[in-house]
Amino acid sequence: MHMKCSLQKQATSAVSNAHRLWSFDNLLPVRKRQLSEDGTQKLLLELDDGQTIESVSMPMPSTRTICLSTQVGCPIGCTFCHTGQSGFIRNLTLPELMAQIRTAAFELHATTGIWPQRAVLMGMGEPLLNFEAVRDCLALLTAPGGPNLSWRKIQLSTIGLPRQLEELGRSRLALPAISLHAPTQKLRDLIMPGARKWPLDELIATLRSYPLPGRERITIEYILIRDVNDSQSHAELLHELLEGVRAKINLIPCNPVPGSPHISPGPERIESFARWLKALGGTAFIRRSLGPDILAACGQLRGEQNTALQTLPLRENGHPMENAS
């Protein structure tokens, strides 16, 4: 708790003469916009060096969530991920992270009239490989001088770097979501080649000792890939692997990626996998995909910049009109 207070004090001091984070200052240029039929909004944002990143705002039952990128590209190379196939270019700086957040919040407010109530670091990149900038960004997000989001309303998605996970747990700046996607080291190495530097046994040991207050649980993200990790034996191995971890499992149907052989299992298979886990005593949910009509999955818009888009009406300065819908 002391570490969190110290970080927030530093962050608040750094922006003491600035506007609140939910301001219209220092926004990133929006190269492309997409608006899904389900209300999901996706942005392709341009950085000063011409590189681009993606940010998404997602409608939830009672709130709106912004999904943020932490790197340009990604070094993990997951075979089921569009960003992973595009390679890694660089980390985002703290000013770029904050400009991305302000831009995503402004765009959401301009089109819906509301500000984000939740944030997830689940966009392009591995957040814990950009730990210092991400940590300072989280401190700003939760600081009283900014949006003052509850750390319980911020989720950080990571393949799981034990040392940085331990520091995240001590700082209590966000809840972790672990991109696991395989119940064995061999299979994980195959579909997530960049994660082999951090062995599963070390990750699971870290998760078993992760400090969680009250009824909070660690989210385990598991992308279901047909004939790769979706059998009953995989469910049994996953349950065994997570023994002793306070976890809930999010089952995510695999998104189609150009050039990748991976596809999602059918709905019946996905439901069966959830039933198998529940029968073993686990807690499993099937995540509903948002924005499939606008390539809302990570890295898809950046990789398909020539795709025809549904464009919102713009002001002369390039920002959306506040009455656009």
Image: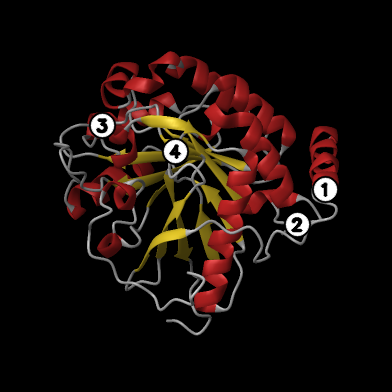
**Disc 3: CA contacts within 10 A as few (<14), some (14-19) or many (>=20):** some
Pick the quarter of the image with the N terminus: top right
Can you tell which mark lies on residue 146?
2
Residue under the point 27% across and 30% down: 234
Query: Residue flagged by tag 2: what amino acid is it?
Result: Gly
* Tags 2 and 1 touching, CB below 8 Å: yes
Which residue does the numbered mark 4 point to in the structure image? 72
Q: Quadrant of the C terminus?
A: bottom left
The residue lying toward the viewer, choosing from 115 and 150, is 115
Q: Nearer the viewer, mark 4 or mark 2?
A: 4
Q: Secondary structure at mark 2?
A: loop
Q: Earlier in the sequence, mark 3 or mark 1?
A: 1
Residue 281 drawn above or below residue 307: above
How far apart marks 3 and 1 lie (CA) works out to 40 Å
Residue 116: give x, y in percent of width and height. 59, 64
Write the residue at 40% across / 27% down.
75
- The answer to the question of whether label 2 and label 3 lie on touching residues, with beta carbons closer than 8 A, is no
Query: Residue 204, how many percent across, how many down?
Result: 50, 22
Q: CA distance from mark 1 to mark 4?
A: 27 Å
Name the quadrant containing residue 92.
top right
